[in-house]
Image (cartoon, rainbow, N blue to C red):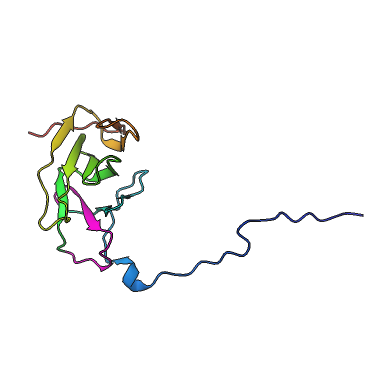
Amino acid sequence: MLRRVVRQSKFRHVFGQAVRNDQCYDDIRVSRVTWDSSFCAVNPKFVAIIIDASGGGAFLVLPLQKSGRIDKVYPTVCGHKGPVLDIDWCPHNDLVIASGSEDCTVMVWQIPENGLGTPLSEPVVVLEGHSKRVGIVSWHPTARNVLLSAAGSVENCTSPE
C-alpha cells in the first residue's frame, strides 16, 4: 500500500491583507535603468528610492511617516551626472547615505534631520577612481566609516570635461 506524505508548512494558515492606499507610496517614477539593484533603501527614519531624472541621476528621500501620493516636484538628492545605480544607508548614522552612479563616482550625502525641504545637490564627499560605472555600494555593518564600492560594465567611463 502506498502512503502519501504531506509536507507540513508553517505558513499554511497565514493569510496576507492588502495595505490601504493611504499607507502606500504613489506616483513615484522609479528608475528604468537596467541594473541588478533593489532601487530602494530603508532605515529607521527614511526610505530612499532611485528615480528617473533628466540631466543626471537622482533619488528621493522620504520620511517613513509620509505616505500617499508623492508630488512630482518633491525635493530630490541630485548630484550625479549619470543615472544612480545603487544606494545604501549607513548603519551607524541614519542621516548618511551613499550612492553609486554610471558617472563612475560614489557620493556620500548628509540628509537633514527633518528630511529634505529643498533639493540636495552638494554631497559631503565625492569618491572618484573607478573607470567603469559603479553598480554596488555597501557600508560595513560593524566598522564605522568603511564603504565598499564595486564597478563594472562593458563600456568605460569618460572623465567630465
Q: Nearer the viewer, residue 27 or 18?
A: 18
Q: Is residue 73 above or below residue 133?
A: below
Q: Nearer the viewer, residue 150 or 6?
A: 6
* Residue 26 x, y percent position in the rendering: 29, 67
Q: Which residues are magenta?
A: 55-72
Q: Is residue 155 above or below residue 43?
A: above
Magenta stretch: includes residue 59: yes
* Residue 9 x, y percent position in the rendering: 65, 56
Residue at the outermost right position: 1
Query: How many discs appear?
Result: 0
Which of the 4 image quadrants contains residue 25?
bottom left
* Residue 94 x, y percent position in the rendering: 25, 46
Query: Is residue 121 shown left or right of residue 90?
Result: left
Query: Is residue 113 shown left or right of residue 12?
Result: left
* Residue 23 x, y percent position in the rendering: 34, 68
Q: Residue at x 34, y 44 (%)?
A: 35
Which of the 4 image quadrants contains residue 51?
bottom left
Q: Is residue 126 above or below residue 34?
A: above
Q: Nearer the viewer, residue 160 or 97?
A: 97
